[in-house]
Amino acid sequence: MKSLNIVIPIYNDQDCVSPFYDEVERVMGGMQDPIEWMLTFVVDLSRDDTLPEIKRLEKAHGSKVVRYIANSKRFGKDASIYAGLKTSNADYTAVMDCDLQDPPSLIPEMITAIESEGYDCVATYRKDRKGEPILRSAFSRMFYVIMNKSSTKMKQGARDFRLMNRDYVNAVLALCERERFTKGIFSWVGFNTKWIPFENIERTVGVTNMSFKSLYADAIGAIISFSAAPLRMAIMFGGGIIAFAFVYVVFVLVKVLLYGTNYSGANTIIVWLMFSTGFIIFLLGIIGEYLSRIYFEVKRRPIYIIRETNIEDIDKIGL
C-alpha cells in the first residue's frame, strides 16, 4: 500500500486543526484505492493552543496518523515546510495549509496524476482572488510578474499546496539554503509538474496571520533570493540618470552660448544633489540586501531547531 504524508506548517491556528483533520479523513476515506496517510503538523512556536489541540488529536487517533513538530522559536513558514519534508519518508508528500483554503478534496486527483499520468509533482494555483483586498491582489500580481522575469518561472496565483513523489522531495531537500523561498525552490528544481486550478476559497475559520507587512518582506526576500533583476534595474536607472545629465548639460550650454542666457542653476544643483543622493542610497540598499543574504548563508545557522516532537529518530537541528 502506498503512503502519503501531509506536511502542515501552522502558526496560531488552533481553531483550524480539528476541521482540517475531519475534512482530510473524509476525503481519504472516500478513495477507491486505499492509501496509508498521516499528518505532520509543524508548529512554529504558536502563542495560542495550537499545539495542545494537535496533541488532543494525537491522543484520539494515534501518533502514526497525527505527528507534530514544535519549533524552538519562530523560524517562519518556509523553514517549517523544510522541517516537515525532512521527516517524511512516505511515497508521496503533500504540503498544504490547514485553514481549508487549500481544498483536501483535490488530493485524490493529485495522486492519480502522479500514479497514472507520469507526473513527479502536482501543484495548484488560484484562478481568481475573490474576497482578497484589491491592493493586496495588485501587489501579488506585480510580484509574480517580477519573479517571472528571472530564471525561476512561477504560475500566477501559485500556492504552496502541492503533492510530490519521493524524487521531487529529495531534490527540494538538497537545496539547504538558509534564506528559503519555497515556491521558488519548487520551481527551480524542475521535474514534470502538472498544475491544477481551483476557485479561491475564503477563510471560514480563524483569521490570517499574514499581514501586508510580512507579505511585503517575504516578497522582497523572494525576489532577491531568485533574481538579480533589482541590480540590473539599478544599473539601467543609473545609466538613464547619466544620459539625462549629459542632455541637460548640452541644453544649458546651448542656451548660454547661443542666447546669452544668464543661468545660475542653483535650484537645479540642489534638486540634482537630492535626486542623485537618494538614488545612491537606494542602490546601496539593494546591494545591502544581497550582502545580508550572503552573510546569513555563510554563518550556516540551523534552518530550524525542534523543541518537542512525537516523531522518533528525528534530527532536532536542521542543518
Image (cartoon, rainbow, N blue to C red):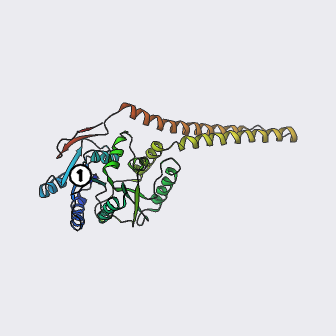
Q: Residue furthest top?
A: 299
Q: In this view of the protein, which residue sits in the foreground, 134 or 69?
A: 69
Q: Residue at x 42, y 67 (%)?
A: 130
Task: Kindly identify the residue that appears in the image at 48 percent across and 55 percent down.
Answer: 139
Can see residue 271? no
Q: How many marks?
A: 1
- Label 1, secondary structure: give it: strand
Residue 187, compared with residue 117, is above or below; it is above
Q: Position of residue 17 (x, y in %)?
A: 23, 58
In the image, 101 versus 4, the foreground residue is 4
Residue at x 23% of width, y 52% of height: 40
Q: Quadrant of the C terminus?
A: top left
- Is 134 left, or right, of 73 in this rendering? right
Instruction: Examine the image and state in which quarter residue 60 appears.
Output: bottom left
Q: Residue at x 28, y 63 (%)?
A: 205
Determine whether, in the image, residue 147 is placed left or right of residue 112: right
Depth check, front residue: 312 or 194: 194
Left or right of residue 283, residue 222 in this image: left
Q: In this view of the protein, can residue 109 be seen by the observer?
A: yes
Q: Quadrant of residue 307?
A: top left
- Residue under circle 1? 40
Amino acid type at image mark 1: Thr
